[in-house]
Image (cartoon, rainbow, N blue to C red):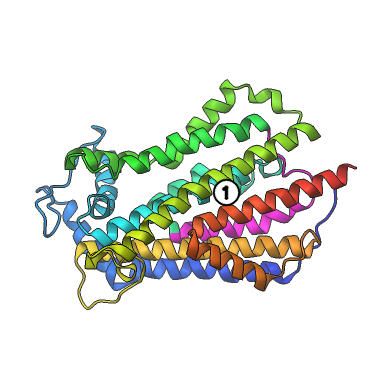
Amino acid sequence: MDQPNLPVARSVVCYATFVGLAVLATYYMRLSPPSNAAGGFFALITEPKPFVFPETDIVLRRTYTGLGPVDMFLSFLVAAFLPGAAGIDRAFQLQQIHFLFSFLPVITVWSVEAARKGSGWKMISFTSFWAIFYQTVGGAIIIPLWYLCFTLTTSTTVYGNDSHSIPPTTARGLLPALLVGYVVPTTLMYLPFLDIDTQQFMVALWQPSPFFVNILWISYTRLAGAADDSQVGQGSRGNGEKTVKTLYVSSAVISAVVHVGVIGICLTSNDPQQSLWDVFMLENRESWSMSQALLFIFQIDFWIIFAASIACACIVVWDLHSLGLTTLGMVQAFAVIAFVSVVLGPGAALSGVWYWREGMLGKKAKKKST
């Protein structure tokens, strides 16, 4: 097995970057004034009387499954998402739409890396386990830690041998799983003709969407006879690579379309709540409404998740440069990634880097086999 020659400083950078981002997220999402303000509103949900969203006549739905503890948990999640989903705060609504569709490439990257031959039984392969925590503890806290695990295990799972390959049937099953399991539930939350009770149900339905993806993916793979892919030869590896690239293109297009659409609305809308500043920029306040506090938390979630994603993308370029697979330098890479993030969105930038990386890994495998 070839041993990769990656810089020693890489581990230091990875720990400092991703642990630092997770710690920063912990403060803002759990200890900051807006998080404390949101906590005060959420405490009211535990009371037996109906919870009415402030400044509205919307009553929080409390029954979703008929199971008391599950319904209480879902009530908290629905309360966190509904001010955005229902447009109670219009800046929050645009931010949330942009955020959740931009998150599609993150799920795509995680799923692909989990499916690689060399990732079996490693921490990065347990995507449902990670999803439990980022859906409950907070994405900005947990997702940088996944990137830390990914960067620390990459040298042995991808760059050191041929274990980057993915069975073609497994790869083909991911796109329909992502579309049905994630894109559809996300879209359903924002359908304008839903009554508020149904919309709350759709918000609750979205919460396990990462698990829907995995269930659908596993089901498709088994039905398609994934066992036939256990022997992955050079020809089938190429097919798998092509399918994985299609995944990256698809997730990039979806996230980019939403990004451009949201930016377009912000630039053309006469609504003062739909400016770029209100949608994307953190704002400190002396007092916080429920919607303002939740918007701040979602903005922190967005910025830290994609700061971690862009950092990981830069480390990927660093790895390929260190191994002689590209001449692209870190400064150039960061400039390109930052530009694409602004123009097409950070989700599209993440997918673009992984698309390019997949090609580099494919060339490395072909060169080694000749």
Residue 351 makes an appearance in the image: yes
**Numbered-mark total:** 1
Left or right position of 79 against 102? left
The image shows residue 86 at horizontal and vertical percentages of 22, 50
Instruction: Give residue 56's quadrant in the image.
Output: bottom left
The residue lying at 57 percent from left, 48 percent from top is 109
Amino acid type of disc 1? Val
The residue lying at 22 percent from left, 61 percent from top is 291
State the residue in front, 7 or 277. 277
The residue lying at 62 percent from left, 66 percent from top is 14
Please tell me whether residue 142 belongs to the stretch shown in magenta. yes
Identify the main secondary structure in magenta. helix
Q: Which residues are magenta?
A: 140-167
Q: Is residue 354 above or below residue 30?
A: above
Determine the secondary structure under disc 1. helix
State the residue in front, 313 or 33. 313
Please tell me whether residue 148 belongs to the stretch shown in magenta. yes
Residue 137 makes an appearance in the image: no
The image shows residue 104 at horizontal and vertical percentages of 47, 48
Instruction: Give residue 263's quadrant in the image.
Output: bottom left
Query: Circle 1: is it few (<14), some (14-19), or many (20+) Cα within 10 Å?
Result: some
The residue lying at 27 percent from left, 68 percent from top is 36
Q: Give the labeled residue for mark 1.
A: 109
The image shows residue 110 at horizontal and vertical percentages of 56, 48
State the residue in front, 146 or 241. 241
